[in-house]
Image: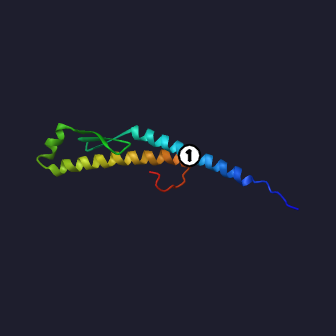
Amino acid sequence: MKVRIPNSGGNQMNAMLQQAQKMQADMEAMQAELETREYTAGAGGLVTVTVTGKHEIKQLKILPEALTEADGDPEMLEDLITVAFNEALSKAMQASEAEMGKLTNGMNLPGLL
């Protein structure tokens, strides 16, 4: 006599696959939305950099006072630009990590960002 065991594992597997597909679709939508956002940071009140969620510079503003403040020292101006750019990028990455973390419930998924 053969005993039949219901195959409930298949239903669970399908549910897990559907859940994974939904998470993937949600993550792709969130990534697309994050890429449209802009993040701005400044340095010394003289330089402002705006980057997009794609980590591209959208705008760089250098106040005229920065030139007089630098007094012929291009390295000072370069440092201000670097600081502002890195801060704007940091804001973009933190926002991305926070939003994606909400979707993954804190799971560390390699290659996500």
- 4 or 15, which is in the foreground? 4
Q: Which percent across, then down, holds residue 18?
A: 62, 46
Which residue occupies 38% across, 45% down?
91
Count of number-bearing discs: 1
Horizontal side, residue 35 vs residue 58: left or right: right
Q: How is the image coloured?
A: rainbow
Horizontal side, residue 35 vs residue 80: left or right: right
Badge 1 amino acid: Met
Horizontal side, residue 63 vs residue 8: left or right: left
Which residue occupies 51% across, 48% down?
101
Q: Which percent across, then down, holds residue 66?
A: 18, 42
- 28 or 97, which is in the foreground? 28
Q: Quadrant of residue 38?
A: top left
Which residue occupies 45% across, 43% down?
31
Horizontal side, residue 14 vs residue 39: left or right: right
**Residue at label 1?**
23
Residue placed furthest toward the right: 1
Q: Which percent across, then down, holds residue 51?
A: 33, 42
- 67 or 39, which is in the foreground? 39
Which residue occupies 51% across, 55% down?
109
Task: Name the secondary structure under disc 1.
Answer: helix
Q: Which percent across, then down, holds residue 2?
A: 85, 61
Residue placed furthest toward the left: 72
Residue placed furthest toward the bottom: 1
Q: Quadrant of the N terminus?
A: bottom right
Q: Using a 10 Å C-alpha cutoff, classify the residue at mark 1 as few (fewer than 14 neighbours), some (14 to 19) or many (20 or more).
A: some
